[in-house]
Amino acid sequence: MMLLDQMMSVVDKLVGEIKEADQEKRDHFVKSAVALFEIATEALKTSPEFRRGFLKAHVEFLDHPEESREMIEKSIQAYKRFRGNN
């Protein structure tokens, strides 16, 4: 439990530093985050285990419309706008 507490403290400090960082450092963080998204996207293509984990997380989100109704409605509207433009 002590290691978990320490790791959570490090993450909290990191998030705080990113929030307070100058634009150059925030831009660097964004580039790093984009690289992680690219890795995750590749993993979705190649790893059945990763796809299953990703799907489970999203199914859980959709299984609770009382908490996600606004996001679901916005997604539907965005899709309708997209379809209307294509």
Image (cartoon, helix red, strand yellow):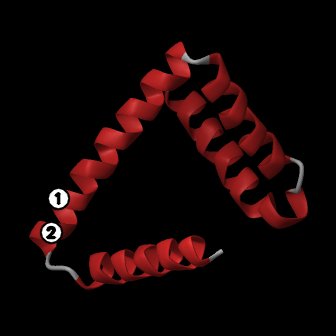
Q: Which mark is residue 49?
A: none
Q: Position of residue 59 (x, y in %)?
A: 81, 40
Q: Is residue 59 above or below residue 16?
A: above
Name the image quarter holding residue 35: top left
Return the residue at label 2.
Answer: 25
Q: Residues within 10 Å of mark 1 (few under 14, many from 20)?
A: few
Q: Can you give x and y, in whole percent of width and height, for residue 16 in the image?
A: 36, 83
- Estimate the spatial distance between the alpha carbons at disc 2 and disc 1, rounded to whole Å: 5 Å
Total numbered badges shown on the rendered structure: 2
What's the residue type where badge 2 is placed?
Lys
Q: Is residue 43 left or right of residue 13?
A: right
Question: Can you name the residue that lies furthest to the front here?
Answer: 2
Residue type, label 1: His
Q: Position of residue 13 (x, y in %)?
A: 38, 82
Secondary structure of the residue carrying tag 2 is: helix
Between 63 and 53, the one nearer to me in the picture: 53
* Residue annotated with mark 1: 28
Residue 11 percent coordinates (x, y): 44, 73
Which residue is outermost to the top? 46
Look at 74% across and 51% down and name the residue there. Answer: 72
Q: Of residues 56 and 71, which is closer to you in this image?
A: 56
Image height of 51 relative to 79, above or below = above
Graded by Cα atoms within 10 Å as few (under 14), some (14 to 19) or many (20 or more), the crowding at tag 2 reads: some
Q: Is residue 55 left or right of residue 40?
A: right
Quadrant assignment, res 25: bottom left
Closest to the observer, 78 or 11: 11
Cβ atoms at labels 2 and 1 below 8 Å apart = yes
Q: Which quadrant of the view contains residue 58?
A: top right
Give me the residue at 65% from left, 37% from top.
80
Q: Residue at x 74, y 53 (%)?
A: 73
- Please tell me whether mark 1 sits on a helix, a strand or a loop: helix
